[in-house]
Structures are given as structure tokens and as C-alpha cells.
Amino acid sequence: MLERIRDRNILVVYAATFLLGTAYGTAIAVIALHLDARGFTKSDIGKLAAVFASGIVAMSIPVGALLRRFSAKTTLTISLLGYALTVGIFPLLRSFGAIAAARFFDGAFSVGVWVSCETILLVRSGPDNKAYVTSLYAVAIALGYIVGPLMAHPIAHAFSIEAAFFVASGIATLSVLVVVASLDADPPGGHVEGPAEQDDADDASPPETALRLLSRIKTSCFAAFAYGYFQASVVLFLPLYLVESKGIPRDRTILVPAFFAAGMLLFSNAAGRLGDRVGHLRVMRGLAVVGLTMILGFVFLGSFASMAVAVFIAGATLASISPVSLALQGVVTPRRDYSRSNSIYNTFYASGMLLGPPMSSIVFRSEGGAGMLYHLAALWAAFVVFAAIYASDDVGAMKRLHAPSGSV
């Protein structure tokens, strides 16, 4: 790994991401159970998830401007600290309004972290290893998502569900210290120097319009939307589906995010390497086909063990799409526009998170858990069709297709 990643700042981002992922995993594993125990309905839970996503949507575009005005390190530090404070006060809140406000700021600070980290990674990585770098970023998140639920389970048993949120806040605070102490400062505007071998010709031309950037990254944006919609829906409603329709004990559902993250952990780097080699969008289509098959499998599988395997494979495929799609938009976007393209990309991700829970809650109430899973599979099928229509957006695959015989 160190042979391909020579900028230590990338490793610092990985370390901070692992700690934040652990905090996320700890909180996510218990949030639905916490809200359910407080008497909130499925509709309420869906609305609160939508409020979280609305915080992401509201901050997605502004955070790109903050990066350019201040710096990646400053934006990242403030965002991490804000998340730590927000998750720490969450279990102390009682009313729907107060909890909704906390969820909004949770989303706003989270997108600040994502855009900052992703911009640093894309700028500091070379043109031929972006998916490799972003896949290891996903691995760091996945490790945290595994450790977090594994911690949340005994904490909830030994103390309380509320205690898991306090632990998550402490871990997020550690990530702040890592960034402050180890990440190199970058100049005002959030611009950091990329590797010398990266072509800077685009940086001298005028910035592209938002519509032109969107045209470049449309397939990545669809993938981000689909993943945000799927992830936000599954995190909230799959545990409830397992309890109500499959008879799985409530405490065992706390481990579900860990199985999903384990699949992401073990396969995302391989998916990244493959994307760098044969084309990012081509790999994303294949992953989506396998993943939607696993979603359909949730309906017919009965035992917790078989469901765990299906969740693991869904994580290995659908979650691995996220870092590969991030790498794709980094490849097709001029370096000077990374903060703007990352903002647009995360807006689509957040829009999926915004629409997913309320729509899934409606389907869950009217058609049951199976109907909810069918509509998630249909979304991924739509992405596969869209990605096939715009296959020419796959820069790596097009280079291989048009390369002279024997040159690849």
C-alpha cells in the first residue's frame, strides 16, 4: 500500500475516517431501536431520517465554497467537532422537534466531513489509482462500521442504548485530535497540491458551469443517489423487517450493519483495483446486478444466518459501488473543480437519503417489508439500465476499447 500511496496526508485521512466510521457505526446500530423505544412510529423514524438527509442537502453545495474560502483541514476539523457534539447530546433529547434539529445538524456536519476528505483524497491521488485510494477510504469507513456495532452491542447490554451515543461522541472527538495534530495545513481556498504527474492543463482553463460538471459526473451521481436511498432505508427498516417478518430477536439485529460493512471491507479494495484497470462504470454495473439479486433474496431467506450472508454480499457489492463512483467522478472532473463536483455528488447522495426513508416507510406500511425490498431492487435495476445507456462515460473502459492492439 505504501508504494502506491506516498502522501502521508492520505493515511491521516484514513485514520480519521476509521475513527469517525466507528462513531457512525456505534450510533447507527442503535438509533432505530432507541427511537422505537421512545415511542416513535415508523413514520416518525422515516421523517427523522429525512431531516438528517435534509441537513446534508442544505450543506452539500455550501461546503464546497467553504473549502475554497478557508481550507480542507479547517472545514474537516470543524465538521468533525460538530458531529461529536451533536451525537453526544442526541440521547439527552426528548421531543420530536429537538431530535429533528439534532439530526439536521448531524447531516450538515457529516457532509462537511465527506466533502473535505474526498477532496483531499482525489487531489492527492494520481490519475491511475483514484479508485484504489477511494476504496481504501471505504475500507477505513467499513472497519469503523464493523467495530462500531460490535461495541454497541455489549454497551447496550451492560449499560444502556443511550450510552452507545456517548461512546460515539468520544470516538469522534479522537478523530478531531488526529486531524488537528497530523494533517498538513493547506492554503486558503481549500486547494492542496496534487501529485506532480497529474496533468494541470485543465487548471488553467475557466471553471466549468455546474450543469457541465453534472453532465460529466451524471452516472456517478445516479449511483450516489441510489446508494443513499438504499443505505438510509435499509439501516432504518431492515432491522424492523427482520423482527416483524422473520422473527429475528431484536438484539441480534444490532449486528446487521456489521455484516454489511464486513462485505464492503473485504471487497471494496478489489473493486477499486478492478475499476482502475477495466473501467469504473463497467464494474459498478456488475456490482449493482449482484447486489439487487441479494436484495430480492432478503424476501425469501428465513434464517438469521442466511440473511447475514445476504447482507454481507450486499455490502460487498452495493457498498463497493460508492468508492468506485467517487473515483469515476474524480477521473472525469478537472482537478480545480473537485470541491464543486464533490459537493454536487454528495447532494445526490443526500437526496437519496432524503427521499429513501419516507418513501420506504410508505411502501413498508402499504405493501409490507417484502414490497419495500422489491422497490429497492427496482431502483438498482434502473441504475444498471442508466449506466448501460451512458456507458461512454466510463473513461477507463473507453480507453481500453479504443487502444491499439497490444497496448493494454
Image (cartoon, rainbow, N blue to C red):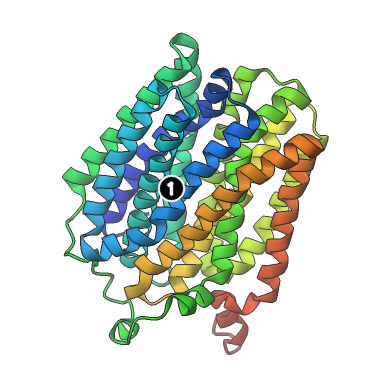
Quadrant in the picture for residue 338? bottom left
Q: Secondary structure at mark 1?
A: helix
**Residue 169 versus residue 148: which sits nearer the camera?**
169
Residue 184 point in image, percent of width and height: 18, 55
Left/right of residue 16 with respect to residue 373 in the rendered view: left
For residue 51, say whether it is visible. Answer: yes
For residue 8, say whether it is visible. Answer: no
Residue 284 point in image, percent of width and height: 62, 62
Q: Amino acid at mark 1?
A: Gly
Residue appearing at x 62%, y 83% in the figure:
401
Residue 89 point in image, percent of width and height: 35, 27
List the residue tagged with mark 1.
Answer: 55
**Residue 314 versus residue 224: which sits nearer the camera?**
224
Residue appearing at x 54%, y 19% in the figure:
38
- Is 156 located above or below residue 18 in the figure? above
Left/right of residue 99 with respect to residue 48 in the rendered view: left
Quadrant in the picture for residue 281? bottom right
